[in-house]
Image (tube, rainbow, N blue to C red):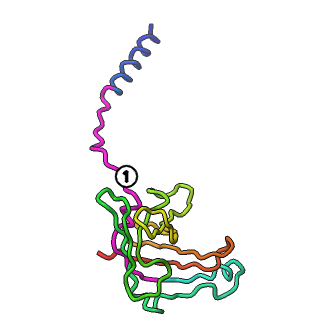
Amino acid sequence: MKCKSIYGLAVVMSLLAIGCDNTDDGSNVDPITIYEKVNGNWGLTNLKMVDEFAKANAIEPSEENLSTYFNYEDFKINFSVDDKNRPTSYEVTGNVPPLFAPKGYWALSSDFQQTNAAAVRIYLYSDAQKTQQTDELRVISVPGNNEEMQLQLVRSSGGAAFVSYVFKLNAIN
């Protein structure tokens, strides 16, 4: 008899616990995409050229700061999105030698940060239909509260990277 009353009490308690769980989580919103974080105007704070061959073979120097050469302190890039936070166009401004096409269209390899530590890629296109890819940038530091982003442009030959450029950018309000 005692077991039945304990069992009955447990059933009643669990039903009360389930019935009283009326959590209000607020309204549902879409998750924040990398497009929203990359969107906007970015100014160069540092440009580093990395000799990938020298780096792989422990030859020094393997890096060179290009920030103050060739007017790169004037480098600015704008990534635009539409009203649904989908990518539209990009444009580089400033009197700088182009390392990639100075204007065109863009898209990301993924809307969200990868869980496997692979870099999200920014694909650059010459046409609005995004059929003629001109280059690819790796997002090696995703913008967050600090409003900083790092992009990497890799040049390769025969499948082997020989030089890369690392752009450190700050958001321009």
Query: What segment is highlighted magenta in the picture?
Result: 19-46
Pick the residue in front: 173 or 89: 89
Q: Residues within 10 Å of mark 1 (few under 14, many from 20)?
A: few
**Residue 123 colored magenta?**
no
Return the residue found at the far top. 1
| Residue 72: quarter of image | bottom left
Q: Is residue 169 above or below residue 14?
A: below
Q: Amino acid at mark 1?
A: Pro
Left or right: residue 162 versus residue 96 is: right
Q: Is residue 91 above or below residue 82?
A: below
The quarter of the picture where the C terminus appears is bottom left
Pick the residue in front: 115 or 137: 137
Q: Measuring from the top left, give residue 92's x and y in whole percent.
A: 39, 79
Q: Measuring from the top left, give residue 167's x and y in whole percent.
A: 48, 78
**Residue 29 colored magenta?**
yes
- The residue that disc 1 covers is 31
